[in-house]
Image (cartoon, rainbow, N blue to C red):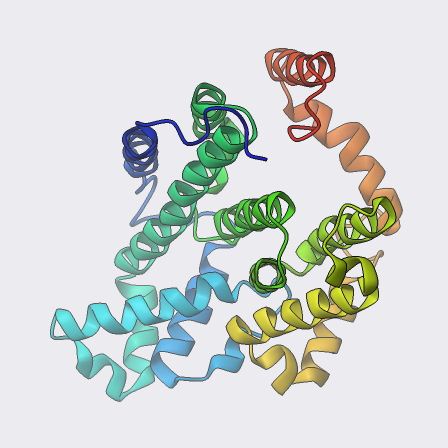
Amino acid sequence: MLAKGVRAGGYHIWLAAVLLLATCIQLWGINRDLPHIAEIDEPTFVSIAVEIATTGNLAAANMGHPGTTLTYPLAAIYRLDALLTGNDALFTRAVLMRDRLYAEDAWLYQWGRLLAGAYAVGAAGLVFSLGRCLLDKRVGLVAALLFMSYPGVLLQTKLVRTDSASIFFTLLAFSTIWYWWDTPSRRRLMVVGLVIGMAIASKYYLATLLALPAGLICLRAWQGRSPDWVARRPLGELALLLLLAAAGLGLVHPYFYLDFPTTMRVLLFEARTVHPGADGLGPAGNFFWYLGVALPANLSIWQLAIGLFGVSWAVYRRRAEPL
């Protein structure tokens, strides 16, 4: 069941306040060094979106991330901007648009940063909603404030990169998983699969999200807590989850399948463990490096203290949901 007080009044007021504050934070200083200098990786994604907007070639996004949850909407925004401002002639010759990319490109990056910021605002709302569902509104509010004030989040979500889209779809996946776990049904499981597929279209490694609902399906079947249709057919539900995740990926990144040879070539290229700038640790080595070095280096003592307090409180109160 949902946490006590989850349906209490005032939720929409608090949510609106969180979204408004997150919007102000994202808009503050969004230009940075524009129009003089773009940040790391931004030209890559802007160039892809421009290519899609000018040529209509959706396959241009079939790259390593792949980031289609960023590049496809951004290409649509560029096209709409040109129509509304009377610059649609730019699209009659793709070279004109590409020339503008290098000669007058600040607006291209501004739209991209606004889109990335919109994902971050949505992510803040999801953090608040998850905290409210798992515990109460106060916890959700504190979690959202911590999320919005975290330097790493502020740095990455104001850039034309896939970070904010990845965070948004990851949190959306957690939300759909929670609601499915709270009230299991085939329809909710299908939504979980679709959302995870969209997350994978942001960054391929988010396929690891599938492990959580898959594990919960097996746990329900083993404990006998699930409805008969799950208890009798856990393998069928696992297959449904994977099928819908594949469908969600294809929905927002169709060229994953339509140009599968390129997809495999890109995946093999990205999976290299030895190349310029790499240390050759391999997937397992990278995982333990991030877990043992990078993550502790980016967490302050206060964040660790708050996290340990939350875990201790959940254990003391025997609240399994937050854990």
As drawn, which residue projects farthest toward the front?
228
In-image side of 101 versus 319 (left or right): left
In-image side of 71 versus 221 (left or right): left
In-image side of 141 versus 10 (left or right): right
* Res 100 seen here: no
* Res 116 seen here: yes
Quadrant, the N terminus: top right
**Which quadrant would residue 305 be assigned to in this image?**
top right
In front: 204, or 226?
Answer: 226
Is 68 rendered above or below residue 176? below
Residue at 81% of width from left, 36% of height from top?
A: 289
Q: Position of residue 4 (x, y in %)?
A: 51, 24
Residue at 30% of width from left, 35% of height from top?
A: 12
Quadrant, the C terminus: top right
Q: Position of residue 131 (x, y in %)?
A: 51, 29
Is 21 rendered above or below residue 175? above
**Which quadrant would residue 103 be assigned to in this image?**
bottom left
Residue at 76% of width from left, 70% of height from top?
A: 239
In front: 255, or 112?
Answer: 255
Q: How many marks?
A: 0
As drawn, which residue projects farthest toward the left?
86
Is 52 rendered above or below residue 211? below
